[in-house]
Image (cartoon, helix red, strand yellow):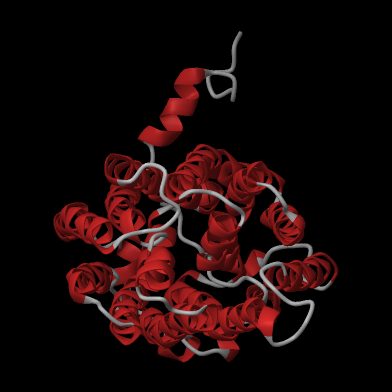
Amino acid sequence: MTNPTSPADPPARFGRYRRLPRNIWIVTAASFLTDISSEMIVHLLPLFLANVLGVRTLTIGLIEGLAETTASLVKLLSGRYSDRLGQRKWLTVAGYALSTAAKPFLLVANSWPTVLMVRFVERTGKGIRTAPRDALIADSITPKQRGFAFGLHRAGDTAGAAVGLLVAILVIWGVHEGSRTLTAPTFQTLVWLSMIPAVLAVLVLAVGIRETAVTRSAVDKSRIRWSALGRPFHKFLLVVLIFTLGNSADAFLILRAQGGGLTLLQIMLTLLLFNIIFAILSGPIGSLSDRVGRKRVLTAGWLLYALIYLGFALAQAGWQIVTLFAAYAVYYSLSEGVAKALVADYVGADQWGTAYGWFNGAIGLAALPASLIAGLLWQGAGDWPGLGMWAPFLWGGILALLAVALLHFWLPSQLNNEALAEMPSK
């Protein structure tokens, strides 16, 4: 007799999706819409700075790094506050709304300080929403489905990115198909279009999200402290920091693609390929981490990242850059949702908001030195012989290899079983 729950049984596979709580689908839908909006313009922003405003790479690194780092302080506070408040929904909605309100100001940006201000406000909104949103996902799902839920969320997020990129591609193709540079009118058209899905995302969250029993329960305030998060989480966060110092803003990958000879349209098509691969793999790899262990999957992802960045340092032809971007999507699938699920495995349920605040905040705080170092190494071609566009990627690859070694040999091989035992059944 066939086992009705066998992985080979298609109805059973579809049943996994049907059993997912409402909140997972609402958050995934909001992320889908938000990424449609964001991906229309975010990858064009470094090209807007470089091609339209004439900004140098060091300043681009400063803009990306400073916006992420300043907003990271908000991530720390937001996650902690959501635990103390015992609520996630309205912090999440407020964060999405603030990011949406910032976008129209890109229409009047005529200098890099204005772009910095917009990026700061938009990233602050992301800082407000990220930790409560991730904690809400963890609140809403059982430990056995946690990797699957975070993977599905990332898949929805990335599918939205693919749609947003497709819209941008159609606009660029219709305006200047073979151009290597971006113009201000094209960028402004995409900013206008990006507002539609951004507003819809806020409405979906405001109407659809429900607070969970966990987030409404009484919280032990004494446990919402750094020391209470536990040594395994502390060690994991330190390794993440080391990795992130070599993980500069993806803006440098866009500039690397342009420097490698790709036209503007080819860059956007390459990014579309990246997001399609990412969307397809995120759910299955998240589910894989539930079965084989998240630490193994994350180690594989970071090792792949090191090889990819070394490849970007050595790439000589456009097809090599396209291939590396495709591999970069596999790295994202192996690491993004898996790392977030691992955070929830290391700490107790009443600390998830605080833990995600520290996790997302630490990554953002490391973004400033990471992007400044990358910009300095790239820009140093004229000041220090031997440096140039390859140097940031060599630096990132070396730090990733160090992080892989620490993740494999230094972090506990077993998850925090005490934390897992504390998690309520759904």
Please identify the quarter of the rendering in which residue 134 is found: bottom left
The relative height of residue 243 versus residue 229 in the rendered view (above or below) is: above
* x, y percent for residue 176: 33, 46
Q: Confirm whether residue 21 shows in the render.
A: no
Residue that appears at 25% across and 67% down: 96
Image coordinates of residue 374 in percent, x first then y, are 63, 77
Q: Is residue 413 left or right of residue 254?
A: right
x and y, in percent, of residue 128 in the image: 32, 77
Residue 300 visible? The answer is yes
| x 29%, y 56%: residue | 34
Query: Would you place residue 245 above or below residue 104 in this image?
Result: below
Which residue sits furthest top?
1
50 horizontally vs 370: left or right: left
How many numbered discs sit on the rendered protein? 0
Could you tell me residue 257's position as x and y percent?
Answer: 57, 55
Look at 21% across and 67% down and name the residue there: 100
Viewer-proximal residue, 114 or 14?
Answer: 114
Q: Is 263 positioned to the left or the right of 232 in the image?
A: left
Front residue (pair 187, 121): 187
Q: Is residue 240 above or below residue 70?
A: above
- Picture quadrant of residue 350: bottom left
Out of 290 and 110, give the one closest to the viewer. Answer: 110
Q: Residue at x 30, y 50 (%)?
A: 36
Quadrant where the N terminus lies?
Answer: top right
Determine which quarter of the picture holds residue 195.
Answer: bottom left
